[in-house]
């Protein structure tokens, strides 16, 4: 950035944390541009998933998570982010413009920034330990501050959610285009994007919620006790692009809050990718009064489980665009 507000190293440090955000299939569908006193976030249409995500809901959600990661990283580095969402009506892929002001970091911002590097998507079963209600309440409170609703799935609606997830897995298993797309983004060994084989366990027949069938899973699952994971559904009052972007920001806040207190998490979106099943989840979780944008499994990872391998990300230089160039060139 010109005029030293802030310096380039600070901006790139913040962006390096921003790109640690979770994204569907780890496709990392974001591009960034740096202005004189601003940072701009764009959705990269070349990373679309036409089979799994034809309306780009998952992509926008992923970019929203990266935007929140950026805000938290900048705050911990001493810069407050003033965010203008969807600033250019002529370009729907221009998701946010971020202006920066001097800021004194709070302990919470420092803690959440530190959690970015420790957060992982953990697809393994969790333990039988119960999650304290206060932790769930804190996550819901931080999501609400960003314009989203977090609903803990009750015993009554849990079965409906499980049925929707199983139905989605069955339909996708019968969809050749979906299977090809998923195979194209999974089973990776040395790529900087996609789902690495070493991070995915083999699905088990007794899994309550069937996981996506990624290619060549290699993660060892040693869990033997009942899984008492809580299920949270994150929703918004609207379902336009702005609502989905805000949902991604709220999703990031929930995941970082959970990581900060030692909880493991896994985001699920497969049943929300089929319209009629998404409606089932909407009715079951929100009584038809909000739009579900993401499902979060949250619980305690087994104490004896091996640390999860780090999921790779593209380098900051690979996701930066010079001003004036078309995004997704």
Image (cartoon, rainbow, N blue to C red):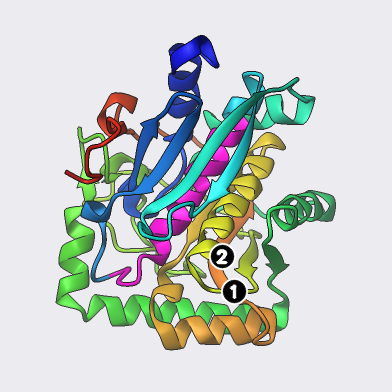
| Residue picked out by circle 1 | 238
The magenta region covers: 52-72
Rendered view: 155 above or below 63: below
Res. 319 visible in picture:
yes
Rendered view: 204 above or below 21: below
Q: CA distance from mark 1 to mark 2?
A: 6 Å
Report the side of 47 relative to 211 (left or right). Answer: left
SS majority, magenta? helix
Residue 35 quadrant: top left
Q: Which of these two is toward me, 297 or 322?
A: 322
For the point 49% across and 40% down, which residue is it? 120
Q: Quadrant of the C terminus?
A: top left
Res. 123 visible in picture:
no
Q: In the image, residue 278 lies at what x, y percent?
A: 49, 81
Q: In the image, residue 311 lies at what x, y percent?
A: 37, 36
Q: Which mark is residue 243?
A: 2
Report the side of 17 relative to 283 (left or right). Answer: left
Q: Going by the picture, which residue comes out furthest to the right?
A: 134
């Amino acid at each position: 950035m010109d005029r030293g507000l802030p310096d380039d190293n600070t901006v790139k440090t913040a962006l390096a944390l921003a790109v640690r955000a979770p994204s569907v299939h780890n496709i990392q569908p974001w591009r960034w541009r740096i202005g004189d006193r601003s940072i701009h976030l764009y959705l990269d249409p070349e990373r679309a998933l036409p089979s799994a995500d034809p309306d780009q809901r998952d992509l926008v959600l992923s970019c929203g998570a990266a935007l929140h990661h950026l805000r938290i990283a900048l705050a911990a580095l001493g810069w407050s982010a003033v965010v203008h969402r969807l600033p250019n009506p002529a370009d729907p892929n221009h998701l946010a413009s971020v202006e920066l002001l001097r800021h004194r970091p709070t302990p919470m911002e420092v803690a959440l920034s530190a959690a970015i590097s420790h957060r992982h998507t953990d697809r393994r079963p969790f333990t039988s330990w119960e999650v304290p209600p206060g932790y769930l309440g804190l996550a819901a409170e931080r999501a609400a501050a960003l314009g989203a609703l977090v609903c803990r799935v009750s015993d009554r609606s849990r079965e409906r959610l499980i049925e929707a997830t199983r139905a989605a897995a069955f339909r996708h298993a019968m969809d050749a285009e979906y299977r090809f797309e998923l195979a194209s983004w999974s089973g990776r060994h040395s790529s900087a994007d996609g789902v690495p084989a070493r991070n995915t366990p083999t699905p088990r027949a007794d899994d309550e919620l069937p996981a996506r069938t990624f290619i060549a899973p290699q993660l060892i699952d040693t869990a033997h006790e009942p899984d008492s994971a809580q299920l949270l559904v994150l929703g918004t009052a609207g379902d336009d692009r702005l609502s989905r972007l805000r949902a991604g920001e709220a999703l990031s806040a929930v995941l970082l809050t959970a990581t900060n207190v030692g909880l493991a998490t896994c985001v699920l979106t497969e049943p929300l990718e089929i319209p009629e099943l998404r409606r089932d989840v909407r009715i079951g979780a929100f009584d038809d009064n909000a739009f579900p944008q993401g499902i979060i499994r949250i619980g305690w990872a087994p104490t004896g489980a091996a640390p999860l391998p780090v999921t790779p990300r593209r380098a900051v230089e690979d996701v930066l665009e010079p001003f004036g160039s078309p995004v997704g060139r």
